[in-house]
Image (cartoon, rainbow, N blue to C red):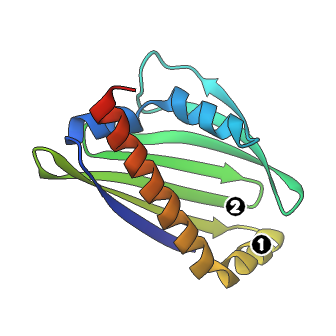
Amino acid sequence: MQFSAREDIQAPIEAVFDMMADFERFERMAMRRGVDVRRTVEVPKPQVGACWTAVFSVRGKPRHVSIELSDYERPGVMRFVSVSKGMSGLTTIELLPLSPRHTRLSIEMSLAARTLPARLLLQSLKLGKSRFRRLFQLRLNEFAREMEERYFHGN
Protein backbone atom coordinates (compact mmCIF):
# COMPACT_ATOMS: atom_id res chain seq x y z
CA MET A 1 0.00 0.00 0.00
CA GLN A 2 1.36 3.40 -0.95
CA PHE A 3 0.18 6.91 -0.29
CA SER A 4 1.67 10.35 -0.47
CA ALA A 5 0.94 13.95 0.38
CA ARG A 6 2.59 17.26 -0.26
CA GLU A 7 2.33 20.72 1.16
CA ASP A 8 3.92 24.06 0.32
CA ILE A 9 5.52 25.89 3.24
CA GLN A 10 6.41 29.58 3.47
CA ALA A 11 9.94 29.08 4.78
CA PRO A 12 13.37 28.48 3.20
CA ILE A 13 14.37 24.89 2.51
CA GLU A 14 17.20 24.96 5.11
CA ALA A 15 14.80 26.05 7.86
CA VAL A 16 12.24 23.41 6.90
CA PHE A 17 14.92 20.71 6.79
CA ASP A 18 16.17 21.72 10.25
CA MET A 19 12.62 21.47 11.62
CA MET A 20 12.12 18.07 9.97
CA ALA A 21 15.44 16.88 11.47
CA ASP A 22 14.39 17.88 15.01
CA PHE A 23 13.84 14.25 16.00
CA GLU A 24 13.53 15.03 19.71
CA ARG A 25 10.48 17.17 18.97
CA PHE A 26 8.89 14.33 16.96
CA GLU A 27 9.64 11.90 19.80
CA ARG A 28 7.83 14.20 22.27
CA MET A 29 4.88 14.62 19.87
CA ALA A 30 4.54 10.83 19.54
CA MET A 31 4.72 10.33 23.32
CA ARG A 32 1.95 12.90 23.83
CA ARG A 33 -0.20 10.75 21.53
CA GLY A 34 0.45 7.62 23.59
CA VAL A 35 3.30 6.11 21.55
CA ASP A 36 6.20 4.68 23.53
CA VAL A 37 9.28 5.86 21.58
CA ARG A 38 12.87 5.04 22.48
CA ARG A 39 16.12 5.65 20.67
CA THR A 40 18.04 2.43 20.25
CA VAL A 41 21.07 3.95 18.53
CA GLU A 42 22.21 7.32 19.82
CA VAL A 43 23.93 9.56 17.32
CA PRO A 44 25.41 12.97 18.19
CA LYS A 45 23.47 14.71 15.41
CA PRO A 46 20.89 13.60 12.85
CA GLN A 47 22.61 11.14 10.55
CA VAL A 48 22.18 7.80 8.80
CA GLY A 49 22.03 4.99 11.34
CA ALA A 50 19.84 6.71 13.94
CA CYS A 51 17.33 4.11 15.21
CA TRP A 52 14.20 4.04 17.31
CA THR A 53 11.68 1.53 18.60
CA ALA A 54 8.05 2.47 18.96
CA VAL A 55 5.10 0.70 20.58
CA PHE A 56 1.54 1.82 19.84
CA SER A 57 -1.93 0.29 19.56
CA VAL A 58 -3.69 -0.52 16.32
CA ARG A 59 -7.18 -1.93 16.72
CA GLY A 60 -6.53 -2.64 20.37
CA LYS A 61 -3.34 -4.62 19.82
CA PRO A 62 0.14 -3.37 20.68
CA ARG A 63 2.39 -3.02 17.65
CA HIS A 64 6.18 -2.92 17.92
CA VAL A 65 8.10 -1.12 15.19
CA SER A 66 11.81 -0.57 14.62
CA ILE A 67 12.68 2.55 12.63
CA GLU A 68 16.02 3.46 11.08
CA LEU A 69 17.12 6.62 9.31
CA SER A 70 18.51 5.11 6.10
CA ASP A 71 19.15 8.22 4.00
CA TYR A 72 19.95 11.77 5.10
CA GLU A 73 20.89 14.20 2.35
CA ARG A 74 20.79 17.79 3.50
CA PRO A 75 18.69 19.76 2.55
CA GLY A 76 16.54 17.58 0.36
CA VAL A 77 15.89 13.99 1.45
CA MET A 78 15.33 11.81 4.50
CA ARG A 79 14.30 8.15 4.32
CA PHE A 80 13.17 5.94 7.15
CA VAL A 81 12.90 2.16 6.98
CA SER A 82 10.49 0.57 9.43
CA VAL A 83 10.07 -3.09 10.31
CA SER A 84 7.47 -4.75 12.49
CA LYS A 85 6.23 -8.27 12.94
CA GLY A 86 5.12 -9.26 9.46
CA MET A 87 5.29 -5.80 7.89
CA SER A 88 7.86 -3.37 6.53
CA GLY A 89 7.64 0.22 5.45
CA LEU A 90 9.54 3.00 3.76
CA THR A 91 8.89 6.68 4.39
CA THR A 92 10.53 9.25 2.14
CA ILE A 93 10.55 12.94 2.97
CA GLU A 94 11.61 15.21 0.13
CA LEU A 95 12.01 18.97 0.17
CA LEU A 96 12.06 21.04 -2.99
CA PRO A 97 12.86 24.78 -3.01
CA LEU A 98 10.13 26.62 -4.89
CA SER A 99 11.74 30.00 -4.24
CA PRO A 100 14.19 31.36 -1.66
CA ARG A 101 11.30 31.60 0.84
CA HIS A 102 9.02 28.73 -0.19
CA THR A 103 9.56 24.97 0.09
CA ARG A 104 7.48 22.01 -1.06
CA LEU A 105 7.36 19.16 1.46
CA SER A 106 6.47 15.76 -0.02
CA ILE A 107 5.99 12.64 2.06
CA GLU A 108 5.59 9.21 0.52
CA MET A 109 4.89 6.12 2.56
CA SER A 110 4.70 2.52 1.49
CA LEU A 111 3.79 -0.54 3.54
CA ALA A 112 4.34 -4.16 2.56
CA ALA A 113 3.07 -7.26 4.33
CA ARG A 114 5.25 -10.35 4.76
CA THR A 115 2.82 -12.61 6.64
CA LEU A 116 -0.83 -13.56 6.26
CA PRO A 117 -2.01 -11.68 9.41
CA ALA A 118 -0.13 -8.59 8.19
CA ARG A 119 -1.76 -8.95 4.76
CA LEU A 120 -5.18 -9.04 6.39
CA LEU A 121 -4.37 -5.91 8.42
CA LEU A 122 -3.09 -4.15 5.32
CA GLN A 123 -6.18 -5.19 3.36
CA SER A 124 -8.44 -3.70 6.03
CA LEU A 125 -6.37 -0.49 5.93
CA LYS A 126 -6.82 -0.35 2.16
CA LEU A 127 -10.60 -0.35 2.61
CA GLY A 128 -10.32 2.94 4.47
CA LYS A 129 -7.55 4.30 2.26
CA SER A 130 -9.41 7.38 0.99
CA ARG A 131 -10.37 8.41 4.54
CA PHE A 132 -6.80 7.79 5.69
CA ARG A 133 -5.40 9.87 2.81
CA ARG A 134 -7.68 12.80 3.67
CA LEU A 135 -6.71 12.62 7.32
CA PHE A 136 -3.00 12.36 6.44
CA GLN A 137 -3.23 15.39 4.12
CA LEU A 138 -5.10 17.36 6.79
CA ARG A 139 -2.45 16.55 9.41
CA LEU A 140 0.34 17.48 6.99
CA ASN A 141 -1.40 20.79 6.30
CA GLU A 142 -1.64 21.50 10.04
CA PHE A 143 2.01 20.53 10.48
CA ALA A 144 3.08 22.83 7.63
CA ARG A 145 1.21 25.76 9.19
CA GLU A 146 2.90 24.97 12.53
CA MET A 147 6.33 25.00 10.84
CA GLU A 148 5.54 28.37 9.28
CA GLU A 149 4.54 29.70 12.69
CA ARG A 150 7.76 28.37 14.23
CA TYR A 151 9.82 29.89 11.44
CA PHE A 152 8.24 33.34 11.64
CA HIS A 153 8.01 33.48 15.44
CA GLY A 154 11.09 31.47 16.43
CA ASN A 155 9.29 28.85 18.59
Give the x, y percent position of residue 35: 73, 41
The circle on residue 18 is: none
Crowding near the residue tagged with mark 2, few <14, some 14–19, many ≥20 C-alpha atoms within 10 Å: some
Farthest-out residue, top:
44
Q: Vertically, is 118 above or below 27?
A: below
Residue shown at the point (40%, 33%) measured from the top left: 21
Dots 1, 2 in contact, CB < 8 A? yes
Helix, strand or loop at mark 2: strand
* Residue 114 seen anywhere in this rendered image of the structure: yes
Q: Nearer the viewer, mark 1 or mark 2?
A: 1
Amino acid type at circle 2 is Met
Q: Cα distance, mark 1 to mark 2?
A: 10 Å
Residue shown at the point (61%, 77%) measured from the top left: 131
Report the side of 99 relative to 80 (left or right).
Answer: left
Helix, strand or loop at mark 1: helix
Give the x, y percent position of residue 94: 32, 53
What is the quadrant of residue 101 in the picture?
A: top left
Closer to the camera, 101 or 88?
Answer: 101
The circle on residue 87 is: 2
Farthest-out residue, right:
60
Amino acid type at circle 1 is Leu
Give the x, y percent position of residue 91: 49, 55
- Pointer 1: what residue? 121
Farthest-out residue, left:
100
Q: Quadrant of the C terminus?
A: top left
